[in-house]
Image (spheres, helix red, strand yellow):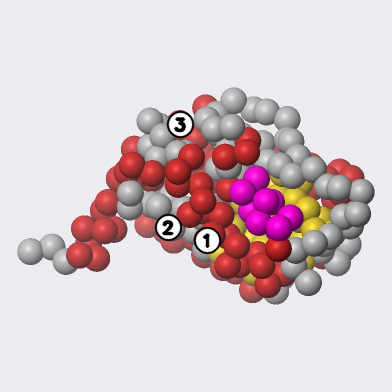
Amino acid sequence: MKSLHVVQHRALQWVLAIGWLLLALAASAQPEHAVKPSASTSHTVLVMGDSLSAAHGLAESQGWVALIGATIAASKPGWHVVNASISGETTAGGAARVAHELSLHHPEVLVIELGANDGLRGLPLQQMRANLASMMTAAQAIHARILLIGMRIPPNYGPDYTHGFEQTYRDLAHQFNATLLPFLLEPIALDRNAFQSDNLHPVASAEPKLRDHVWTALAPLLH
């Protein structure tokens, strides 16, 4: 009899793999502000991610970034969230945009949720690592704290690539002394009903679980 661990592992692979090729098909969109600051706010959390942070297929207000923005507005006076996520974004795109976004918003905290589209395309891990490192270096140059949100990929490119992909996040978090959330979709990955028809992007009812998951890592950085 197969162990529960094996069954769960294969279920996770099914959820990730069945919709994986649709990730790059998400239409590109200009980043929007999830929660607009009032005149009295002065501390910014900047989120730079892909479609999983851009509320693909949902109203912006239903995504985890907007939901966490509402949590911050209610519990952390003086803080607000800016969502600069773009569907289809790669780490190269994030690295190209980061200087502008940092200059525009002057965040105290930078949340990076990128890499899934790199994995989709099988891009070299060294390139992905360099792009993320560039973003983190830019954040540290303005003394912004960093939350790095990781992703997992199915084993389409072999175990070495799959393992190396996950290890990249761990290595960078250690190198830059950043906070790491290893897997954004962990709370819902085994629940097929938590995903839209593409089997990749979460439905609206699953987004609060992602908000709560991210909040455990983000809250300690808001000081």
Q: Amino acid at mark 3?
A: Leu
Which residue: 74% across, 44% down?
35
Q: Main secondary structure of the magenta part?
A: helix
Q: Which residue occupies the foreground of this view, 130 or 153? A: 153
Q: Secondary structure at mark 1?
A: helix
Counting from the top left corner in percent of width and height, residue 44 is at 81, 55
Query: Residue 213, which numbered label?
Result: 1
Which residue: 89% across, 45% down?
104
Q: Which image quarter: residue 168?
A: bottom right
Q: Amino acid at mark 1?
A: His
Please say whether residue 64 is visible from this viewpoint. yes
Q: Secondary structure at mark 2?
A: loop
Which is more N-terminal, label 2 or label 3?
3
Which is more N-terminal, label 1 or label 3?
3
- In the displayed structure, does residue 120 sit left or right of residue 106? left
Q: Nearer the viewer, mark 3 or mark 1?
A: 1
The boundaries of the magenta stretch are 65-74
- Circle 2 residue: 187
Q: Are marks 2 and 1 in contact (CB under 8 Å)?
A: yes
Number of other residues with Cα within 10 Å of mark 2, as a class: few under 14, some 14 to 19, many 20 or more: some
Q: Within the magenta stretch, is there residue 66?
A: yes
Q: Within the magenta stretch, is there residue 147?
A: no
105 relative to 148, above or below: above
Q: Nearer the viewer, mark 3 or mark 2?
A: 2
**Separation of residues labelled 3 and 2 (CA atoms):** 21 Å
Q: Amino acid at mark 2?
A: Pro
**Separation of residues labelled 2 and 1 (CA atoms):** 7 Å
- In the displayed structure, does residue 107 sit left or right of residue 151? right
62 relative to 164, above or below: above
In what quadrant of the picture does the C terminus appear?
bottom right
Please say whether residue 123 is visible from this viewpoint. no
- Circle 3 residue: 22
